[in-house]
C-alpha cells in the first residue's frame, strides 16, 4: 500500500443470537469483563498503544448508540450506525466510503481482546510492503496455534499439509479497493467463512482446477490470494502473522476462558 493515514474501525454490532451476552447479562458481548477490563477496552487500548491517531471508528447496531456513547465518553470515536440485519462487510463498506484517498481502514472486532500493539504494528508493516488494496491477516495454525494452544477450536482452511489458515479478525482496506460489484461476493464469503468447503467454492467460482487443488490440499497462500482477487475484483493478499493469539477471538465460553487465562498471564 502507499503511505496512508490508518483509520481504525472496530466492528461491534450485536448479532441477533449471542449466547455470551445473554449468559453475562450485558447488552453486547463487547462489555464482558476479562482480567479487569471489558473486551472492547482491551481492543481500544491496543489501538492506542499502537499510536494510531483518533478519531477511531466504531460500527454498532443503531439501537445501542446510547450504550456505546456512555462507554466511550473518554475516547474520541466516530460511531457508524447500522441496522440489525447489516453484515460486518456492509458496515465496513459504509465506513470505507467515508474515507479520503489518503486514508486506509484498519478493521478489527470488539471480541478480539488478545489484540496488542505489537500485532497491529506487525500487520501494518506487512500491509506497507503489499501492493494489495485488501489485506487479510491470518495465522498458520499448523505451525503455530496448535502447538501453543492445542485445546483451541478454530475453522481451518487447509491449503496444504503444512499450512492451515485461520482468520485473525484483522484487515486493511484502502479506498482504491472499493468496487460496487465487490459487496455481494464479500458478503457471501463472510456468510460462508465457517464452512471451508462453501468458502472455497465461492472463491474458486468456475476455476475447477483451483477448486480441485484446494480440495486435495495442494495449494499455496499466494494462489489463494490470486483467487480471492479474481473473486472479489479487488487486489487481495493473505498474510500470516507470527502471533498464535491473533486468531483467538471470543465466540464461545471456551474461547472466553482461554482469553481470560492468557490476559491474566500477561498482566502478571
Image (tube, rainbow, N blue to C red):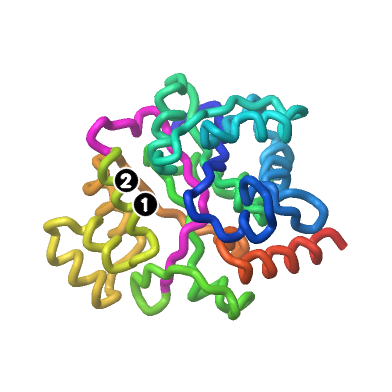
Label 2 sits on residue:
186
Badge 1: residue crowd in 10 Å (few <14, some 14–19, many ≥20): some
Q: Would residue 4 be visible to someone looking at this image? A: yes
- Decide if residue 21 is on the left or right side of residue 218: right
The image position of residue 256, as x and y in percent, is 66, 64
Label 1 sits on residue:
190
Please say if the residues under marks 2 and 1 sit with CB atoms less than 8 Å apart: yes
Q: Magenta part of the protein: which range?
A: 163-182
Q: Would residue 3 be visible to someone looking at this image? A: no
Task: Locate the N terminus and report the quarter of the image it occupies.
Answer: top left
Q: Residue at x 49, y 69 (%)?
A: 154
Q: Which residue is drawn at 44% across and 43% down?
A: 88
Q: Residue at x 38, y 68 (%)?
A: 157
Element under label 1? Answer: helix
- Decide if residue 221 is on the left or right side of residue 72: left
Task: Locate the C terminus and report the quarter of the image it occupies.
Answer: bottom right
Q: Which of 130 and 166 is in front in this view?
A: 166
Asked if residue 36 is positioned above or below residue 177 in the image, the reply reads: below
Quadrant housing residue 12: top right
Residue 180 painted magenta: yes
The image position of residue 165, as x and y in percent, is 43, 66
The image position of residue 69, as x and y in percent, is 68, 29
Q: Residue 17 carries which label?
A: none
Amino acid at each position: 500500500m502507499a503511505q496512508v493515514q490508518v483509520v481504525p474501525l472496530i466492528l461491534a454490532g450485536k448479532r441477533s443470537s449471542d449466547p455470551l451476552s445473554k449468559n453475562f447479562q450485558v447488552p453486547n458481548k463487547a462489555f464482558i469483563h476479562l482480567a479487569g477490563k471489558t473486551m472492547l477496552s482491551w481492543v481500544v487500548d491496543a489501538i492506542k498503544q499502537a499510536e494510531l491517531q483518533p478519531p477511531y471508528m466504531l460500527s454498532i447496531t443503531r439501537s445501542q448508540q446510547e450504550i456505546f456513547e456512555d462507554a466511550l465518553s473518554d475516547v474520541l470515536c466516530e460511531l457508524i450506525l447500522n441496522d440489525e440485519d447489516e453484515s460486518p462487510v456492509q458496515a465496513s463498506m459504509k465506513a470505507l466510503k467515508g474515507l479520503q484517498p489518503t486514508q486506509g481502514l484498519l478493521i478489527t472486532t470488539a471480541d478480539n481482546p488478545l489484540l496488542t500493539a505489537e500485532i497491529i504494528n506487525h500487520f501494518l508493516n506487512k500491509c506497507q510492503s503489499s501492493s494489495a488494496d485488501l489485506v487479510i491477516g491470518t495465522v498458520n495454525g499448523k505451525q503455530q496455534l496448535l502447538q501453543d494452544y492445542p485445546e483451541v477450536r478454530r475453522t481451518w482452511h487447509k491449503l496444504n499439509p503444512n499450512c492451515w489458515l485461520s482468520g485473525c479478525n484483522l484487515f486493511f482496506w484502502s479506498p482504491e479497493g472499493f468496487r460496487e460489484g465487490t459487496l455481494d461476493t464479500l458478503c457471501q464469503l463472510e456468510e460462508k467463512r465457517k464452512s471451508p468447503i462453501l468458502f472455497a467454492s465461492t472463491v474458486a467460482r468456475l476455476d475447477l482446477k483451483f477448486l480441485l487443488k484446494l480440495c486435495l490440499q495442494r495449494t499455496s497462500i499466494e494462489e489463494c490470494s490470486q483467487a480471492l482477487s479474481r473473486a472479489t475484483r479487488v487486489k487481495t493478499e493473505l498474510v500470516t502473522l507470527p502471533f498464535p493469539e491473533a486468531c483467538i477471538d471470543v465466540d464461545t465460553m471456551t474461547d472466553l476462558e482461554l482469553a481470560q487465562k492468557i490476559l491474566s498471564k500477561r498482566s502478571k
